[in-house]
């Protein structure tokens, strides 16, 4: 180390800055070594954090080496050199998460957030930047793969809870997996956080396996407290949405004969709904299409008064006649469960394409002002719509900025506001006299 003495402390500002510049220039090698030592220290600290996370998550030795390699490459990259210390600490967890996704290891981002006690938004930003910088292909983990690991965290064995409330992890995982598939078909999984929908599926699976009065009385918060897991704040919303889907399908069960299915009674029908879910999905979509088509048909007295009514009726008749011969509005209910896979039976299209009255139609004799009427919201035309359609984003309203130049005209009311009233003048004079008299006394 080349150096003479520490910074001088008793001197003028000019001499102090001059001597500092000279001292720094003479000790440039020293500062370089200090900087490298600091970088090496933080690098080793990050590597130790990566190893600790890998051992907590019980990753293989190969995965641990891969995570260390990712961390070294990212730490030495120019994009991560001049970042905050908090981002460098989070970078270790992001490398472990990317390694788990590359090897299809069922670890969610929420798990990394809990281990690092960091902000999920910060981890998401650093993870996206790291994947883009290192050009890593890390496909997101399937939610079905996360289910088995998540179920093991619930303490529902006879050793932890009463026998009436206990449930094996295998049966719970099997029933929750079917509920997750149904939730994915109803757009409840896409673009959502995995932990809340997993918690909701496991809770409903636990209630539906033995729908006794004791289990039905349990709320989600009480269930999570009994199972010794942390309840997500979004999980109750997912439970409500999943019950709504089950109610729509349960309404199509033929032996109910039109009885109303409520969220309180649908739990007892989950077994039948899941066994026949593909058939019930088709019947529910067909019923929804028929309801929309019946609403679009106008009474005979109003058909002649509305332009284009005959054209719309022709479109509806054409849509009905386009069905294959022998096809009925509702598929006949099959008494046996849907054991054939979705790939063999064909994917169920959950987007209802309905010929609505008032859709754009061009042709001879049509008026231009009626050629483009308003189209209803797509969320109202489909039985199961994505969250982006169901919950529209609130548009940000731009507040106009008022530019004040000083050349604006002053109104009479504004001038009056600056002139003192007679009462204010009297109060001011009295206060001034009182202050003057108090000064004379002292």
Image: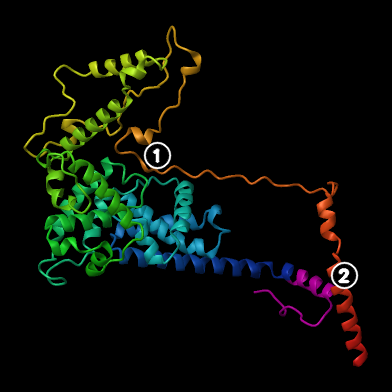
Q: Is residue 379 left or right of residue 133?
A: left
In magenta stretch: residue 142: no
Quadrant in which the N terminus is drawn: bottom right
Query: Residue 325: in sight, yes or no?
Result: yes
Residue at image position (31%, 46%) is 189
Q: Residues within 10 Å of mark 1 (few under 14, many from 20)?
A: some
**Secondary element at tag 1:** helix
Which residue does the numbered mark 1 point to in the structure image? 389
In magenta stretch: residue 16: yes
Q: Is residue 19 left or right of residue 242?
A: right
Q: Residues within 10 Å of mark 2 (few under 14, many from 20)?
A: few
Against 52, is 332 above or below?
A: above
Which residue does the numbered mark 2 point to in the structure image? 425
The location of residue 427, given as percent across then percent down, is 84, 74
Residue stretch rendered in magenta on the structure:
1-23
Q: Nearer the viewer, residue 142 or 382?
A: 382
Residue at image position (49%, 48%) is 133
């Amino acid at each position: 180390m080349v150096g003479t003495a520490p910074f001088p402390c008793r001197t003028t500002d000019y001499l102090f800055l001059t001597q500092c510049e000279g001292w720094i220039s003479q000790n440039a090698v020293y500062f370089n070594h200090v900087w490298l030592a600091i970088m090496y220290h933080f690098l080793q600290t990050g590597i130790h954090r990566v190893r600790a996370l890998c051992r907590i998550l019980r990753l293989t030795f190969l995965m641990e080496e891969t995570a260390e390699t990712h961390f070294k490459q990212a730490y030495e990259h120019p994009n991560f050199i001049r970042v905050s210390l908090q981002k460098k600490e989070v970078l270790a967890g992001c490398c472990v998460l990317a390694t788990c996704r590359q090897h299809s290891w069922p670890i969610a981002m929420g798990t990394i957030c809990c281990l690092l006690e960091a902000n999920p938004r910060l981890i998401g930003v650093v993870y996206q930047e790291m994947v883009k910088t290192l050009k890593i292909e890390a496909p997101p983990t399937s939610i079905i793969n996360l289910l088995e690991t998540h179920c093991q965290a619930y303490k529902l064995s006879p050793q932890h809870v009463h026998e009436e409330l206990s449930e094996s992890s295998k049966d719970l995982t099997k029933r929750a997996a079917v509920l997750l598939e149904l939730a994915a078909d109803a757009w409840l999984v896409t673009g959502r956080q995995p932990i809340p929908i997993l918690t909701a599926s496991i809770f409903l699976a636990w209630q539906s396996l033995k729908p006794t009065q004791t289990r039905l009385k349990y709320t989600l918060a009480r269930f999570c407290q009994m199972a010794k897991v942390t309840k997500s704040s979004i999980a109750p919303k997912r439970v409500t949405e999943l019950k709504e889907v089950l109610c729509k399908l349960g309404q199509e069960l033929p032996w109910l004969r039109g009885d109303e299915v409520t969220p309180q009674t649908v739990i007892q029908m989950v077994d039948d709904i899941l066994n026949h879910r593909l058939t019930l999905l088709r019947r529910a979509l067909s019923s929804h299409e028929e309801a929309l088509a019946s609403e679009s048909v106008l009474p005979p007295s109003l058909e002649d008064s509305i332009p284009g009514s005959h054209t719309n009726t022709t479109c509806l008749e054409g849509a009905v006649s386009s069905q294959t011969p022998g096809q009925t509005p509702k598929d006949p209910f099959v008494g046996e469960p849907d054991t054939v896979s979705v790939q063999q039976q064909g994917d169920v299209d959950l987007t209802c394409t309905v010929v609505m009255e008032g859709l754009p139609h061009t042709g001879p004799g049509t008026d231009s002002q009626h050629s483009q009427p308003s189209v209803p919201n797509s969320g109202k035309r489909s039985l199961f719509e994505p969250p982006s359609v169901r919950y529209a984003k609130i548009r940000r309203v731009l507040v106009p900025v008022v530019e004040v130049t000083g050349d604006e005209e002053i109104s009479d009311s504004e001038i009056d506001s600056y002139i003192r009233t007679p009462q204010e003048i009297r109060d001011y004079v009295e206060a001034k006299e009182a202050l003057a008299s108090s000064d004379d006394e002292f």
